[in-house]
């Protein structure tokens, strides 16, 4: 079974631009979560989607948004990029999305904002 | 809210030494607890987990026991190898949410031959 895939793997943008990141979960997985990883803040939860609905949201500004499609693929969008948005963005999928169910992580998208 | 505190790194050990990475948590009810590992240049991998009090998670020689009374989930390994060099994250999934996982700051482990 193919793992979680994220595209692109690396991205360079400038301040003020917007960016869209993509995540394809493991086949059959319906829950997709997004995390931001930075050296200063560590791993922080962004949001989680299940069956095209956002179920959980972390403490990030409205510039961060996401969506999930009927095939469970998910996209994350960041508008009006700031320097502080430079980070590794990780996507994770799981079968049912219930507490305690194992999450499988993708390799991440490294976003650099100049 | 939920939080996870783990020991600061980096931790440097000689090969075959005993490893302990401390992790304590704050959460309401009975969270599920996890240890994830991130090897250089790679994504996160689940190392082990425990979903209820007194459960012991184990994998690849690593162990951690869910201690409700001390709200701890310390990671241990009896004999580390150079290949264990990585960053280790303690995490919890709270009772109130679904896949909203709260991570600790990570502990970098370096094992020298």
Image (spheres, grey):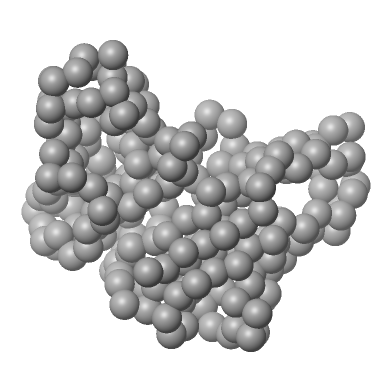
Number of marks drawn? 0
Q: Residue at x 84, y 42 (%)?
A: B13
Q: Residue at x 30, y 70 (%)?
A: B98
In the rendered image, residue A36, in percent from the top left (x then y), is placed at 35, 41
Q: Quadrant of the rendered structure where residue A58 is?
A: bottom left
In the rendered image, residue B88, in percent from the top left (x then y), is placed at 61, 49
Front position in the image: B28 or A10: B28
Q: Where the C terminus of chain A falls, by quadrant? A: top left
Left or right, residue A77 beside residue B73 = left
Q: Residue at x 42, y 68 (%)?
A: B2
Q: Is residue A49 above or below residue A1?
A: below
In the rendered image, residue A34, in percent from the top left (x then y), is placed at 29, 48
In the rendered image, residue B60, in percent from the top left (x then y), is placed at 71, 56
Q: Is residue A20 above or below residue B95?
A: above
Q: Quadrant of the rendered structure where residue A63 is?
A: top left
Q: Is residue B5 above or below residue A46?
A: below
Q: Residue at x 75, y 42 (%)?
A: B11
| Residue A5 visible | yes
Left or right, residue A5 beside residue A66 = right
Left or right, residue B5 beside residue A69 = right
| Residue A107 visible | no
């Amino acid at each position: 079974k193919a793992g979680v895939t994220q595209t692109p793997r690396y991205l360079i943008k400038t301040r003020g631009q917007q960016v869209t990141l993509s995540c394809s979960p493991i086949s059959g997985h319906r829950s997709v979560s997004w995390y931001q990883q930075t050296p200063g803040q560590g791993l922080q939860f962004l949001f989680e989607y299940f069956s095209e609905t956002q179920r959980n949201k972390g403490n990030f500004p409205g510039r961060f948004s996401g969506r999930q499609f009927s095939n469970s693929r998910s996209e994350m969008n960041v508008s009006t990029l700031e320097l502080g948005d430079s980070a590794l963005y990780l996507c994770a999928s799981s079968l049912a999305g219930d507490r305690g169910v194992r999450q499988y992580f993708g390799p991440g998208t490294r976003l650099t904002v100049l | 809210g939920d939080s996870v505190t783990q020991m600061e790194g980096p931790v440097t050990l000689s090969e075959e030494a005993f490893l302990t990475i401390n992790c304590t948590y704050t959460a309401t009810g009975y969270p599920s607890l996890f240890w994830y590992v991130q090897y250089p240049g790679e994504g996160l991998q689940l190392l082990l987990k425990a979903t209820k009090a007194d459960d012991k998670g184990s994998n690849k020689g690593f162990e951690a026991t869910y201690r409700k009374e001390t709200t701890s989930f310390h990671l241990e390994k009896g004999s580390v190898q150079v290949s264990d060099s990585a960053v280790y994250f303690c995490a919890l999934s709270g009772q109130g949410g679904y896949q909203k996982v709260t991570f600790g700051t990570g502990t970098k482990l370096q094992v020298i031959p």
